[in-house]
Amino acid sequence: MTVVGIDLGTTNSVVATVQGGGVHVLADENGDRLIPSIVSFHPGGEVLVGRAAKARRRIDPKNTIFSIKRLIGHAFSSPTITEARSRFPFDLREGPGGGPIVHARGQDFTLPEISAFVLRRIRQVASLAVGVSVDKAVITVPAHFNELQRASTKVAGRVAGLEVMRILNEPTAAALAYGLGRTGRERVAVYDFGGGTFDCTILDLNGSVYEVLATAGDSFLGGDDVDQAIAWRMADEILAKHRFDARSDPQSYERLRASAEELKMLLSIHPEATVQIPEVAYGVGGRALDVTFSMNRAEFDALVAPLVDRTFTATQDALGVARLSPSSVDKVILVGGSTRIPLVRRRVEAFFGSRPLDDLNPDEVVAVGAAIQAAALTDATRKQDIPPPPPLLRASDPSPSTQSGPGFGPPSSITQSPTTAAQDFGTLSSPGATSERAPARPSQMPSGNFGAIDEPPTMHSSTGVRVDAEAFTNQVRLPGDLPTQSAVAISHSSPFGAVDDDDIPSIVSSVAAGFGSLEGDNVPSLVSN
């Protein structure tokens, strides 16, 4: 039985597994390890996911859905959804219970359904890579996700045909991948600057226990915002030279945005770069407007500096909640593709006073940690001479005592070597168990019809906290997991376009039916055992 770890990202997703004592990041049939978290509804009825969907952002932005992770768990009337509706070209509407739904090709989709399309593609990639059907996974989420957001992610996994073994905090996964905390207590900052969001999480690692001390972030701060800043600079130049505002036309703007993303990646490597942008617009007689745009590193740094400044505002907030100074942090982990920007790396090092850890691919490190946790939760680990998984942690007060025993911990060494279909992260040895603690946070859910929901206490509650072991480990409860009065009601009458547990079989069928065409033209079905 093969189990996988999935980093379900805002912009890109990654899947990894433990095989032969090593962690492998799995690639698709084209050798790509990054799977764009994008879904496009084709006029022919097919559902495109990943790179095929990303390509359609230029030609069909209204029916191409992205950055859903930013939106899950928010009310339609929330500032987050209001901001998304002003930014995103696809149609977000108010659904049952006051939550957002996506309207595309005359159909309505809940946000977990959109995520399920992405997860089903991830499952397909993993199954093709390992040669057997994959049906169990650990899925990561930001540490700040509330209970409903975690529940929505778990529902999406179930709709995609996955048994979600655990919902794991992304910063915990990153720390697992680096094998931190084995030799003693360490305070670690995880600086996660991804495609759509920024999060800084402060962890206290003590042997087998990983505790989240604080987390802070911004749901609209990531590589996409860097792309937008460059695209607007391009649009300003085109407007000045050609008297055409590309921002007024969704297709023209998507061409700029795609070119801006390319320019960003080039400038993260080279001191200057130039991109060609074909067919930005069409003039009289159908004549195409093609433009060339150049930028150097200094101009790039000046353009993105305000965005980078915002990451350190959130970082300082997290440190303040944890009551730590930058110099008291022992190690800093870089996560997310935007940490490749040279200015970001320089600023992180200057802020913390030490060089951040960047040995592992920042796009893949979370999936690597998730794969390690997934291997720990299955009997398959014993077949690979890996110790059994850790026991569940139970807390009875804000600073709970922990119980741990022999278990599967982080790798003691990681050696990278190039491969084709999978990235090998080396041999694993596991000295101890790993448990996870997270801060209790105020619910982000407004008052209304929620069913039975237990709202967590505030982060610094002076009252005792009693946490169910299953809920504590996953930080999520679904119908059937716990007695009725302590379970979250996930239904169409609950908030934010959530999915009714009883509706999952029919949704699975509809998702599967629409999943006929994925990346490329000849992607086979899921491999059978």
Image (tube, rainbow, N blue to C red):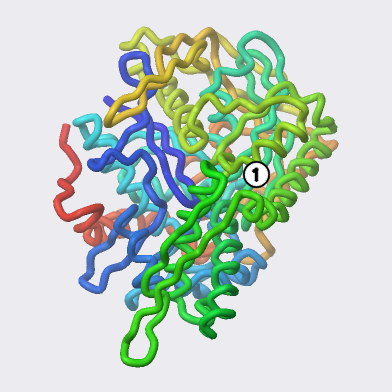
Vertically, is 17 above or below 80? above
> Does any portion of residue 487 appear in the rendered image?
no
Q: Quadrant of the N terminus?
A: top left
Q: Amino acid at mark 1?
A: Asp
Percent of width and height locating residue 98: 57, 70
Under circle 1, the secondary element is strand
Vertically, is 22 above or below 486? above
Percent of width and height locating residue 304: 66, 54
Residue in the picture at 68% in, 40% down: 200
Q: Residue furthest bottom?
A: 284
Residue 135 in which image quadrant: top left
Residue 237 in which image quadrant: bottom right
Residue in the picture at 48% in, 38% down: 363
Depth check, front residue: 17 or 364: 364
Question: In the displayed structure, does residue 261 sit left or right of residue 210?
Answer: left
Question: In the displayed structure, does residue 363 sit left or right of residue 220?
Answer: left
Q: Quadrant of the C terminus?
A: top left
Percent of width and height locating residue 91: 46, 74
> Does any portion of residue 58 appear in the rendered image?
yes
Residue in the picture at 55% in, 79% down: 241
Residue in the picture at 40% in, 59% down: 114
Q: Which residue is mark 1?
A: 199
Percent of width and height locating residue 13: 42, 44
For label 1, the crowd category at 10 Å Cα-Cα, with few meaning under 14, some 14 to 19 and many 20 or more, is many
The number of discs equals 1
